[in-house]
Image (tube, rainbow, N blue to C red):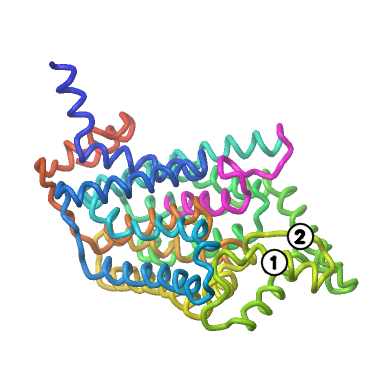
């Protein structure tokens, strides 16, 4: 009986939330699509718990506005299929939108976790993910001989999720959530090298912009001696990056230069840059053909294949146009692109209000999470995937749910057990994290 009682204590709703949170932030760079099963499984369980009245639907104004934007985007895609009379064809491509529909339900379940505990889980899980991402990147780069793609199976997706983990570590160190900053610095360095080994040039830009944004948000903490310390750290950071990543960076820059020369001088589209330009031309033509409601989400591959054949006499196939908003314009028209933009605009607006009005470190950390995910996705989505990939969709929801809750949400009371105090919740963290937590008490 004592063993059964101990097992029940390990799987109380509060602790299950803690384990769930660790997996959601550790898995994306390491096990790739597994995070989709974790998040969507959590969403399904949230539906069941709310239906059985074991959880309360936790609604506050920022969450409601973000839910409206997300649901409007899903509705725009559904409307495009109805207008094009292609619901049967599009149905397999509409199913992944369920990940977005889980947003308010996952928010209601996730928000039973005490904010301080959740923030520290996010930072520590991201730190661990950066170290493992570097290990996988080194193995793939030097032993397998491919661009680092981690467990994502795609270098761009891998670089995007590692970028998020890296900047979360920076935000965690600067916000004061973690006093042990040296491990976070090493994790930041490890994750950055992993991103360099991915060869994703747009992710390098996203990392730079997001990192600068976090530094600017925390500029008041970087005055005086802290400024000198940060300058020294950045210098050391640059030296290490140059030592480990110079060859990878110079190689990718040379490829870009040669692709540009081939495209401009010879009109050769048979290169990484040329294919992207061709996709943009095909997508623009498809959008102009049906600008209001688009062609439906299931028409993309056929349009691309036909476009390459007719416009460029090439045999190539892709499932997106290597630009997130262009893909939305083709699939769901102006309505789809506007509602997709609204998701990021509403999220950024919520974060801006918190950063302007709040001095609470947890709330500001949550707002920084939103800023980081908005910058990273919009930057990477300029030449790649914005939404429509299982890993990226799940990670976007993970960051929007947890970031919105930390920034401006309220903790939801449990209905079958009392809300655990921070010290009790912290006991479910790994032992190393628990020691750090106690050090702060």
- Magenta stretch, overall SS: helix
In the rendering, which numbered label is found on residue 57?
none
Quadrant containing the C terminus in the rendered view? top left
Label 2 belongs to which residue? 316
Q: With 430 as the anchor, is 133 left or right in this view? A: right
Tell me if residue 422 is in the magenta stretch.
no
Q: State whether residue 295 appears in this view.
A: yes
Which span of residues is magenta-colored? 143-168
Q: Position of residue 236 (x, y in %)?
A: 57, 48
Image position of 438 with respect to 319: above or below: above
Crowd class of label 1 (few under 14; some 14 to 19; many from 20; radius 10 Å): many
Q: Position of residue 46 (x, y in %)?
A: 26, 49
- Cα separation, mark 1 vs mark 2, equals 8 Å
N-terminal of the pair, mark 1 or mark 2, is 1
Residue at position x 51%, y 39% in the image: 30
Q: Are marks 1 and 2 in contact (CB under 8 Å)?
A: yes
For numbered disc 2, what is the local secondary structure? loop
Q: Position of residue 75 (x, y in %)?
A: 40, 71
Q: With 35 as the anchor, is 275 left or right in this view? A: right
Tell which of 107 and 122 is nearer to you. 107
Tell which of 178 and 431 is nearer to you. 431
For numbered disc 1, what is the local secondary structure? helix
Tell which of 78 and 126 is nearer to you. 78
Label 1 belongs to which residue? 304
Q: With 297 as the anchor, is 140 left or right in this view? A: right
Q: State whether residue 232 appears in this view.
A: no
Residue at position x 38%, y 71% in the image: 348
Crowd class of label 2 (few under 14; some 14 to 19; many from 20; radius 10 Å): some
Residue at position x 80%, y 74% in the image: 311
């Amino acid at each position: 009986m004592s063993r059964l009682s101990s097992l029940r204590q390990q799987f109380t709703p509060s602790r299950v939330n803690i384990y769930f949170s660790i997996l959601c932030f550790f898995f994306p760079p390491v096990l790739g699509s597994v995070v989709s099963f974790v998040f969507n499984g959590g969403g399904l369980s949230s539906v069941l718990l709310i239906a059985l009245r074991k959880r309360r639907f936790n609604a506050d104004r920022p969450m409601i506005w973000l839910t409206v934007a997300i649901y409007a985007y899903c509705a725009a895609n559904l409307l495009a299929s109805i207008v094009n009379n292609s619901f049967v064809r599009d149905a397999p491509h509409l199913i992944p939108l369920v990940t977005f529909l889980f947003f308010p339900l996952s928010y209601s379940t996730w928000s039973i976790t005490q904010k301080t505990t959740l923030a520290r889980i996010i930072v520590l899980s991201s730190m661990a993910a950066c170290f493992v991402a570097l290990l996988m990147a080194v193995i793939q780069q030097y032993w397998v001989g491919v661009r680092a793609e981690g467990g994502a199976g795609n270098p761009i997706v891998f670089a995007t999720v590692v970028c998020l983990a890296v900047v979360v570590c920076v935000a965690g160190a600067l916000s004061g959530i973690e006093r042990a900053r040296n491990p976070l610095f090493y994790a930041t360095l490890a994750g950055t090298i992993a991103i360099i080994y991915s060869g994703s040039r747009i992710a390098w830009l996203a990392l730079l912009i997001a990192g600068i944004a976090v530094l600017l948000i925390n500029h008041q903490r970087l005055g005086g001696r802290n400024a000198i310390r940060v300058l020294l750290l950045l210098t050391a950071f640059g030296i290490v990056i140059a030592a480990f990543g110079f060859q990878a960076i110079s190689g990718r820059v040379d490829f870009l230069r040669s692709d540009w020369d081939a495209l401009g001088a010879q009109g050769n589209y048979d290169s990484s840059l040329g294919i992207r330009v061709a996709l943009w031309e095909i997508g623009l033509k498809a959008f102009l053909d049906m600008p209001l409601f688009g062609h439906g989400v299931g028409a993309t591959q056929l349009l691309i294949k036909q476009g390459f054949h007719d416009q460029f006499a090439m045999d190539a196939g892709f499932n997106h146009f290597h630009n997130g908003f262009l893909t939305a314009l083709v699939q769901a028209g102006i309505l789809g692109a506007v509602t997709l933009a609204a998701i990021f605009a509403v999220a950024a607006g919520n974060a801006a209000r918190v950063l302007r009005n709040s001095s609470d470190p947890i709330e500001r950390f949550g707002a920084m999470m939103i800023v980081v995910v908005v910058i990273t996705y919009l930057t990477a989505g300029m030449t790649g995937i914005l939404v429509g990939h299982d890993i990226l969709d799940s990670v976007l929801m993970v960051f929007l749910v947890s970031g919105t809750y930390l920034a401006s949400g309220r903790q939801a009371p449990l209905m079958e057990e009392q809300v655990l105090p921070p010290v009790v919740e912290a006991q479910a963290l790994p032992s190393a994290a628990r020691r750090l937590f106690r050090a702060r008490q």
